[in-house]
Image (cartoon, rainbow, N blue to C red):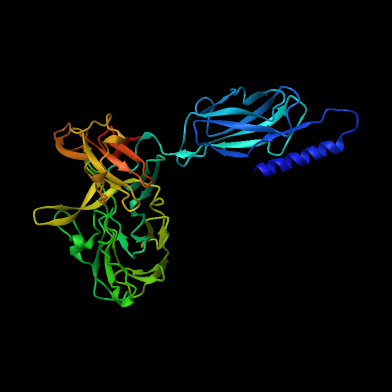
């Protein structure tokens, strides 16, 4: 950059010299920014402007200011101060450079583009403004200090799963029924089923995708029914999926019958209840999954079909999974990139015990952490620490685990009650005796507490929470 600056000024001076006469007219100086861009790393930063030769007299430079997603006095300030979108920078006689100070008052939150462009518009002494007449000052991204958010899961039927990135405050809502299978992007060949719609998968003995299969009532799970071998490990262990690891040997990859689960209810349930899986059946499919080099080859059809469709799924290392809709017959966008979300709000296939052992069970109002992308969580009871007093020094790293359910349903509870007419209702509460610690994939640590799960009318599926970064 220094060589380029000297070369630019040399051409300017040569041009000025060629145009000069012998009449002792003062030769114009040349002025330019020392660089054309600057990434802020400190709170206060000097910004340098250079002259080609020492100034013949004292004077001043006038700079115009262009702001992008920032405001003077709120996000930044300068010395000398900005007045009417200009900065006047004085300089003394016989100096080769001058500077003004840029002070950053607010960081750019991750994902934001914030910058200020300064442009030399005039010089009070005889000077030529060189090519480096502007500099763009960029705010470096940093993690959000905290916020209060309301993930839009969509009310008591909770039609959406919402992915939240705490460091940027960004929330991504996706219809739960938009996908059916997720294909892992890692070195293992693993496939997950949609854990938000009561889906299950059962291996057959066949390798012929065109062989007719039948519905299997034992795959439908309700209170006390179903098999935990037909759903993915609820803790999120990718080695414990209902569909076995896809073998490099084709003959080892069997056909699976897929119970596609249930749609969200189309009619809102009674106040205090949820309708995440009270809609119509999503039907049945059969799939056979093979390897194709480093990709997946998926054969799929209705269970009574004697022909099938086929699609190749390519791994994408930027994401935990590539998602496929068997109903729409195409890949679909679901999760953000694996390092760009921390927790998600959804209904979820967990397990519970009704007295005869663990069975799959649909939980509404569930919160998962992105364990596969590197996000971990643990719970803190207020009998040990209050939310306000909890600091980074109080974080116990030994409590972070690889279980994606560490928040799960622990943040809320339901109790029985009656409405104004004496009818029984389920009263939903956000627990106030606990909060959670979340470490994101970048290593930022936050404390998170849930403030509500219902709206003013008492309808579920309206979660709110607040969080703050720990430093």
Indicate left or right for 43 with 406 as reference.
Answer: right
Image quarter in which the C terminus is found: top left
Residue 229, by quadrant, is bottom left
* Residue in the picture at 18% in, 64% down: 218
Residue 423 visible in this rendered orientation of the protein: no
Residue 260, by quadrant, is bottom left
Residue 268 point in image, percent of width and height: 27, 43
Pick whichever, 163 or 463, lies toward us: 163
Residue 82 point in image, percent of width and height: 60, 24
Above or below, 405 relative to 253: above
Indicate left or right for 456 with 58 as reference.
Answer: left
Above or below, 337 relative to 95: below
Residue 118 visible in this rendered orientation of the protein: yes
* Residue in the picture at 28% in, 40% down: 437
Image quarter in which the N terminus is found: top right
Above or below, 12 relative to 178: above
Residue 383, by quadrant, is top left
Residue 169 point in image, percent of width and height: 40, 39
């Amino acid at each position: 950059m220094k060589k380029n600056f000297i070369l630019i000024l040399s051409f300017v001076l040569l041009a000025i010299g060629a145009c000069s006469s012998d009449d002792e007219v003062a030769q114009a100086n040349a002025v330019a920014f020392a660089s054309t861009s600057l990434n802020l790393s400190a709170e206060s930063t000097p910004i340098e402007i250079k002259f080609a030769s020492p100034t013949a007299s004292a004077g001043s430079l006038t700079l115009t200011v262009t702001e992008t997603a920032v405001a003077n006095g709120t996000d930044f300030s300068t010395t000398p101060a900005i007045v009417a979108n200009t900065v006047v920078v004085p300089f003394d006689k016989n100096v080769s450079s001058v500077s003004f100070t840029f002070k950053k008052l607010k960081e750019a939150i991750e994902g934001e583009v914030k910058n200020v462009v300064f442009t030399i518009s005039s010089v009070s002494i005889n000077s030529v403004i060189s090519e480096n007449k502007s500099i763009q000052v960029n705010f470096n991204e940093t993690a959000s200090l905290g916020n209060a958010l309301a993930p839009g899961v969509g009310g008591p039927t909770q039609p959406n799963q919402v992915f939240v990135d705490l460091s940027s405050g960004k929330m991504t809502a996706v219809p739960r029924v938009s996908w059916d299978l997720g294909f892992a992007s890692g070195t293992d060949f693993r496939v997950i089923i949609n854990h938000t719609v009561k889906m299950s998968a059962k291996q057959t003995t066949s390798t012929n995708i065109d062989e007719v299969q039948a519905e299997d009532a034992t795959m439908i799970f309700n209170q006390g029914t179903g098999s935990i071998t037909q759903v993915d490990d609820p803790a999120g262990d990718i080695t414990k999926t209902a569909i076995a690891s896809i073998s490099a040997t084709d003959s080892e990859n069997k056909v699976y019958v897929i119970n596609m689960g249930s749609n969200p209810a189309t009619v809102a349930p009674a106040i205090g209840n949820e309708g995440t899986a009270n809609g119509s059946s999503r039907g049945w499919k059969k799939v056979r999954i093979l390897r194709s080099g480093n990709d997946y080859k998926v054969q799929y059809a209705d269970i009574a079909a004697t022909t099938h469709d086929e699609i190749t799924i390519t791994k994408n290392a930027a994401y935990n999974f590539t998602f496929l809709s068997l109903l729409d017959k195409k890949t679909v966008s679901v999760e953000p990139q694996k390092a760009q979300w921390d927790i998600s709000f959804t209904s979820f296939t967990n397990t519970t015990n009704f007295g005869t052992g663990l069975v799959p069970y649909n939980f509404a109002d569930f919160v998962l952490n992105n364990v596969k992308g590197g996000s971990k969580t643990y719970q803190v009871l207020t009998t040990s620490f209050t939310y306000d007093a909890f600091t980074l020094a109080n974080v116990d790293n030994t409590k972070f685990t690889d279980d994606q359910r560490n928040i799960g349903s622990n943040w809320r509870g339901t109790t029985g009650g009656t409405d104004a007419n004496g009818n029984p209702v389920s009263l939903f509460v956000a627990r106030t005796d606990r909060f959670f610690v979340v470490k994101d994939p970048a290593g930022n640590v936050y404390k998170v507490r849930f403030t509500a799960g219902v709206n003013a009318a008492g309808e579920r599926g309206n979660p709110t929470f607040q969080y703050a970064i720990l430093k």
